[in-house]
Amino acid sequence: MDAAKLERLYRSREASPLEATRASLERIERFNDAVNAYVHVDHEGAEKAAKASARRWGQGKPLSAIDGIPVSMKDLAEVAGMPARGGSLTSSAAACEEDCPPARMLREAGAVILGKTNTPEFGWKAVTDNRVFGATSNPWDTRLTPGGSSGGAAAAAALNMGVLHQGGDSGGSIRIPAAFTGVFGFKPTYGWTPQWPPATEPSLSHIGPLTRSVKDAVRMLNVIGRYDYRDPYATRGQPDDWGADIDQDLRGLRIAYSPTLGYAEVDEQIAARVREAARNLEQLGAEVEEVHPGFESPIDIFQKLWFTASLDFWSKCSDRKREQLDPGLVDNARAAQRWSALDLFQALGRRANFTECLERFNQEYHLLMTPTVPIEPFATGHEVPPGSGMRDWEEWAPFSYPFNLSQQPAASVPCGFTESGLPVGFQLAGGKHDDVRVLRACHAYMQAHPPRFPRVPDPAQVA
């Protein structure tokens, strides 16, 4: 059931938040051993919050449209009463004393926080494994990765272990696992969903939802998409209703469809599914034109920022803590040691030029469509596909991080499956602050082409 149906049932008293919460906890108990999506489950706190919500609904005084809706938080987020390990042996197992802005906003709206979902160490890579909790598996084939860094949230969404799931996205960490698991993932315009404490590289990080529908994402954004002074980069101007245009058709929308962005290599099956999705958008009324936005790969710009963030963290660690870090994170930090301040400064200048290029492109086209990820999910325990010859995750995820550099809204929409039964997603990105239009187009597609979700992970395939 989605949040809208649960709200109707709560209002009519045909069901209660306590029943929904217990059903979510039962699904976590049933499926989590197979996928390792949750790393902390607060049974007592969730039941207490659900009982309080049930009383409010019984009195006809709900706090919001998501009062009593079960939600999860990524393990990078601070939630009072729960640890925030961030997948790192260098972190404390002690419970946090204060809620981060999204957790506070969700609590104030009456949502029931079930627990925390898995992430790689401090979210540094696009797969989900760490030395504290191990690897998260893909619900469609538990031998494979769900992507990352919000892989736990995506697996939880795919298996309906809760209704609304919070993720974070600094280079694709919402959209990549959404594509790999067949759910909807949305990265809002930078600064519109507040974050505190700041991320490792705060100018790249966006907070957003992973859900089974766009309308569920909208309900979550209507709560967490509000200004909070604690985020030094937070901006105002959010829509009063993130779903204001959700039921409009796509007539009048000009969508630029770029199969490769002019430089990426894409698996033939992925390319075919996304090409079909482009045709489907056209049939829904949009004007779709195949065109490239005209920039070269910004991987060097991104890595200058991303690797330097790893160096900043590594440099503050003691020798003992450095030994506890993910070796890949350490490799990034050491790569950044070779760069000068001038290298970083020039990368920032190139980032500004790159962003201007994309914003200029959006003056002619409302939305830019690409594959979300150009490959199928691969085996767990690897940062890159085994045998690919690649070194870093950015090499196999060339479509996502450009829109972190530009700070524009972007979503991943499920659009079918490969011959091996693995999900495929396409990406829609818009100009800054054009989130409502992105959500409108995504909703129209998913209404016309409903996604399919996994039923039960096959225990025989558990790695």
Image (spheres, rainbow, N blue to C red):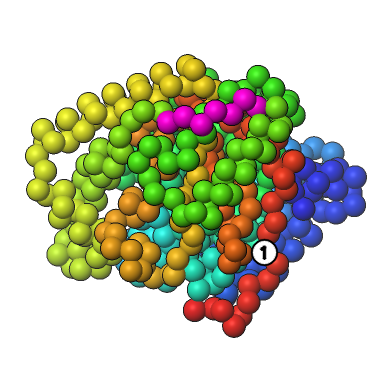
Residue 335 placed where, x, y %?
16, 52
Q: Quadrant of residue 195?
A: top left
On screen, 262 above or below 144? Answer: above
Magenta segment: 286-292
Sort mark 1 into few (<14), some (14-19) or many (20+) by Cα contacts within 10 Å.
some
Question: Camera-side residue: 48 or 456?
Answer: 456
Q: In the image, what residue occupies the spot 60% across and 63% down?
A: 419
Where does residue 109 sit, x and y in percent of width and height?
66, 39
Amino acid on which disc 1 is placed: Pro
Mark 1: secondary structure: loop
Q: Residue at x 71, y 33 (%)?
A: 283
The image shows residue 207 at horizontal and vertical percentages of 48, 41
Front residue of this view, candidates 91 and 130: 130
Give the residue number, with chain letter if any, for mark 1.
Answer: 454
- Looking at the image, which residue is at 9% across and 48% down? 338
Q: Position of residue 408 (x, y in %)?
A: 45, 30
Q: Is residue 291 visible?
A: yes
- Residue 378, compared with residue 52, is above or below; it is below
**Between residues 98 and 249, which one lies in front from this camera angle?**
249
Q: Is residue 263 left or right of residue 162?
A: left
Q: Residue 290 colored magenta?
A: yes
